[in-house]
Amino acid sequence: MSNRTNIPGTSPFEPIIGFSRAVRIGNVVHVSGTGPVGAEDLSPAEQTRVVLKLIETALSQAGATFEHVVRTRMFLARVEDWEEIGRAHGEVFGTIRPASTMVVAALLNPKWRVEIEAEAVLP
């Protein structure tokens, strides 16, 4: 696929697991599930803000912005964090309003309270 661009992140697991932080194909950008690396001891809201900053960097490297995001998926370690995480997500996406899903799941790092993935479509 000549129109595919893999955007690497900083995870040492990328080559081991076989993934990229994001992949752009044509005008579509898929951002992998992103955890709050280095922010494990922060509140769920702060972890969410860190995750969104990492996603923003990946989008930027792919030529996109938050305004291009059409879908997010939020994976929560604890159901009781939904409102705090949701409000932090809303700080970025309150007016953009992508399709979004919130699911409770076991996350790879037991200190992570949230992991988010995103999809963006450029005009």
Image: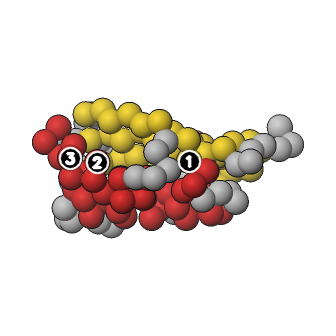
Expressed as whole percent of the image width and height from the top left, the position of residue 115 reads: 36, 47
**Along the horizontal axis of the image, is 50 left or right of 84?**
right
Secondary structure beneath label 2: helix
Label disc, if present, on residue 86 of the rendered structure: 2
Expressed as whole percent of the image width and height from the top left, the position of residue 60 reads: 62, 63
Q: CA distance from mark 1 to mark 2?
A: 16 Å
Expressed as whole percent of the image width and height from the top left, the position of residue 107 reads: 29, 41
> Which quadrant of the figure has residue 40?
bottom left
**Residue type highlighted by circle 3:** Glu
User: In the rendered structure, are the residues bearing label 1 and label 3 in contact, judged by CB atoms less than 8 Å apart?
Assistant: no
Q: Nearer the viewer, residue 118 or 32?
A: 118
Secondary structure beneath label 1: strand
Q: Nearer the viewer, residue 36 or 80?
A: 80
**Residue at the (55%, 41%) spot, across then down:** 70
Quick one: quadrant of the N terminus?
Answer: top right
Q: CA distance from mark 3 to mark 2?
A: 5 Å
Q: Which residue is mark 1?
A: 69
Q: Around disc 1, counting alpha carbons within 10 Å, would you say few (fewer than 14), some (14 to 19), or many (20 or more)?
A: many
**Residue at the (27%, 64%) spot, across then down:** 46
**Along the horizontal axis of the image, is 67 left or right of 13?**
right
User: In the rendered structure, are the residues bearing label 3 and label 2 in contact, judged by CB atoms less than 8 Å apart?
Assistant: yes
> Vertically, is 40 above or below 110?
below
* Res. 37 in view: no
Disc on the earlier residue, 1 or 3: 1
Q: Around disc 3, counting alpha carbons within 10 Å, would you say few (fewer than 14), some (14 to 19), or many (20 or more)?
A: few
Disc on the earlier residue, 1 or 2: 1
Q: CA distance from mark 1 to mark 3?
A: 21 Å
**Residue at the (36%, 59%) spot, across then down:** 91
Q: Which residue is mark 3?
A: 83
**Residue type highlighted by circle 2:** Gly
* Res. 107 in view: yes
Q: Around disc 2, counting alpha carbons within 10 Å, would you say few (fewer than 14), some (14 to 19), or many (20 or more)?
A: some
